[in-house]
Image: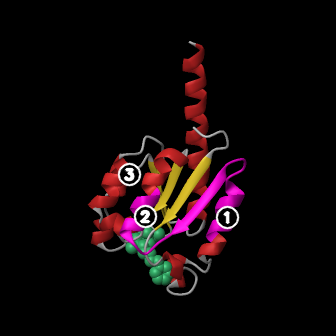
Amino acid sequence: MPETPVIYVLNGPNLNLLGVREPEIYGYETLADVQALCEQAAEDAKIVFHQSNHEGQLIDWVQEARTQASAVVLNPAGYGHTSVALLDALKSLSIPIVECHLSNPAARERFRHKTYVSLVATGVVSGFGAHSYELAVKAALKLIRERAATAARSSKA
Ligand code: CA2
């Protein structure tokens, strides 16, 4: 684990439109507002925050997180419901993955009820708008600290 914990917060397609369209579903905060909330929630950890509309770019960042991050918070957006390739990339990680959604996909159309990401996520936060990200970053921090404590205990034993 890097000395300063690093949390990758990755955002999938169309989330660059946040706060601009469909505020009744996704809220009025922009993606820049969401980034600021994540940075506030991160305490001593560093946030690396990215958004892309391209599947391959998201996969490249997941692969980068293998060596650069202590945890990943991921809102895969539409790719969560479709991308086996993103799932395969996530499977290569041995750090916590927190899946995050602004809306509650389980309360929406049937095709949103399942994501591939959930198969490998440690946990999922959904339905709280931009606050979902704060909760997800807090959850990631807790998981990072628990892992560090476990590693310290086993190195003493
Ligand atoms: O609730 C979420 O965070 C979602 O991941 C958002 C995805 C959707 O496909 C998932 O089922 C649930 C859609 C992201 C689209 O973002 C927009 C934001 C503003 C305006 C239009 C789209």
Quarter of the image where the N terminus is located: top right
Q: What is the number of the mark on residue 10?
A: none
Question: Quick one: SS at disc 2?
Answer: helix
Neighbor class of circle 2 (other Cα within 10 Å; few <14, some 14-19, many 20+) is many
Q: Residue 114's spot in the image, x, y percent?
A: 31, 61
For image coordinates 28% across by 70% down, the residue present is 111
**Range shown magenta:** 34-61
Q: Which amino acid type is marked by label 2?
A: Leu
CA gap, disc 2 and disc 3: 10 Å
Question: Quick one: SS at disc 3?
Answer: helix
Residue 55 is one of the magenta-drawn residues: yes
For image coordinates 43% across by 40% down, the residue present is 94
For image coordinates 63% across by 56% down, the residue present is 47
Q: Residue 112's spot in the image, x, y percent?
A: 33, 69
Neighbor class of circle 1 (other Cα within 10 Å; few <14, some 14-19, many 20+) is some
The residue labelled by disc 2 is 58
Q: Earlier in the sequence, mark 3 or mark 1?
A: 1
Q: Is residue 98 above or below residue 142?
A: below
The reply to whether residue 107 is in sight is no
Q: Are marks 2 and 1 in contact (CB under 8 Å)?
A: no
The residue labelled by disc 1 is 37
Left or right of residue 44, residue 141 in this image: left
Name the image quarter holding residue 30.
Answer: bottom right
Residue lying furthest bottom in this view? 21
Neighbor class of circle 3 (other Cα within 10 Å; few <14, some 14-19, many 20+) is many
Q: Is residue 132 above or below residue 66?
A: below
